[in-house]
Every structure is written in C-alpha cells, then in structure tokens.
Image (cartoon, rainbow, N blue to C red):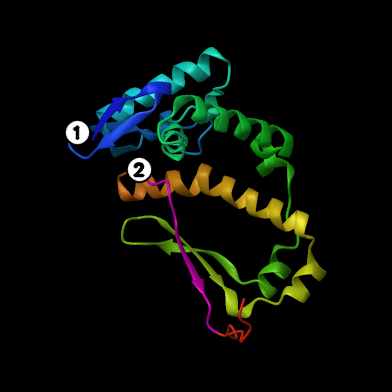
Amino acid sequence: MELDRESGGRLRTSRSGLRAKLIYSLSRRKSGSLFNQASFIEDIRFIEEQQIVEDLRKVLSAENLLPEHHDDYHTLLRFLQARKFDIEKAKTMWKNMLLWRTQYGTDHIEETFKFEELKEVKGCYPHGHHGVDKQGRPIYIELIGKIDPHRLVEVTSMERYVRYHVLEFERTLNKKFPACSIAAGKHIDSTTAILDVTGVVKSSTIC
C-alpha cells in the first residue's frame, strides 16, 4: 500500500506497497494489563501506515490529547481510516471521543458501574460471548427471536442497559482482545457477531 500526500494532510492509497512484519510484546499495549508476563504476537503493518500513525501521534501529543492508556497504534489507525487518513479530521474525531469518555465516565466504568440485574436481563434478552471464530476473534451472539421487550423495560432502564453495553465494550477492549491476541499469536481487535433471528415473526407492513 502506498500513501501519497494530498492537500490538507490527506493520503491516497494503492495496494502496491511494502509490509512490515513486526513482533512486539503485548505488555506494552496497556499499562496495568492483567497480563504481567511478556506475550509475543505477530503484528503485520504497512510501513506507510506506520508513518501516518506516527504523524497523528505527534499532533495529538503536542496538544496534550494522547493519554498513555489510549496511545495504541491500532486505535490511532482506525481513527485515520475512519477519516480517510485526513489527520485534522481524525484529530477532531479523537478529541470528541476523549470528551465523551470523560463526560460518560468510560475510563472508570469497570470500577464504578455494577449491573446487578444482568441475570434478569439475559432471561429476556439472551446474549453473550461464546468462544472464538477461525481467525481467533471473540464471537458475540444475540438470540433476537427470544427477546421480551416488555419484560426488559421492567427489569432495567434503557439508560442502564446502554451503560451496560459500554461496560461490555470496555471489557472486550481491555481483556478479551488481549487474551484472544495471545491465544491466536496475532493482533485481534474485532469480533464476529451472530444475530439469531429464529422465532422472529415477519411483519407484513410495507414501509
């Protein structure tokens, strides 16, 4: 993949570039990780992408927008990809993310939020992680056809249910992805989602 600079810091991509195959220690990724031992995994990166990620890192660091626990190569790359490698747009998106995390309390949600009604919620909204796929990614399953929405709003509120999902995303980022990366021997940062619609009644309403 070759990344050619355009005006405004944008990059144009093609599929003819070189790849850099790196071996790195997972213990570098997160401070305070539950994995204390050095766990080595293979991480394949495009050389040109590494440069633009480093450019974004420098911009964020200069404006004090790069907390140590968020200084992660693959996270920065996702923000760049989401904004077509436009550094300024990626920086704005990043700033908004940090602001939301501060306002919502996301960085500390694993310590501050307890979802005591989880058992009751799973009884009327069956869902959860189960194993990994062939690529080593965690599998998330929802049994859509068994959802009881009336019971769901009785056992919890929508605000708490949304906060619970944020909590689960944080656990996936901080625990499941690192564990899956160690098991697979390569970087894992995505999931496979299965939405089982067995039992869902088809609507005859035409929108």
Separation (CA) of disc 2 from disc 1: 21 Å
- Residue 31 visible in the picture: no
**Mark 2 residue type:** His
Q: Compared to 191, does 8 lie above or below?
A: above
Task: Look at 70% across and 51% down and name the residue there.
Answer: 163
Kindly identify the residue that appears in the image at 32 percent across and 56 percent down.
Answer: 135
Is the residue marked by circle 2 packed among few (<14), some (14-19), or many (20+) residues within 10 Å? many
Q: Determine the secondary structure under disc 2.
A: loop
Q: Position of residue 147 (x, y in %)?
A: 65, 76
Residue 28, image x and y in percent?
42, 28
Q: Nearer the viewer, mark 2 or mark 1?
A: 1
Percent position of residue 24, x then y = 31, 31
Q: Nearer the viewer, residue 9 or 122?
A: 9
The structure residue drawn at horizontal position 60% and vertical position 52%, both measured from the top left corner, is 168
Relative side of 156 to 35, left or right: right
Q: Please name the amino acid that badge 1 sits on.
A: Gly
Q: Is residue 183 visible?
A: yes
Tell whether position 178 is magenta.
Answer: no
Disc 1, SS: loop
> Which stretch did the figure color magenta?
187-198
Numbered badge on residue 17: 1
Identify residue for label 2.
187
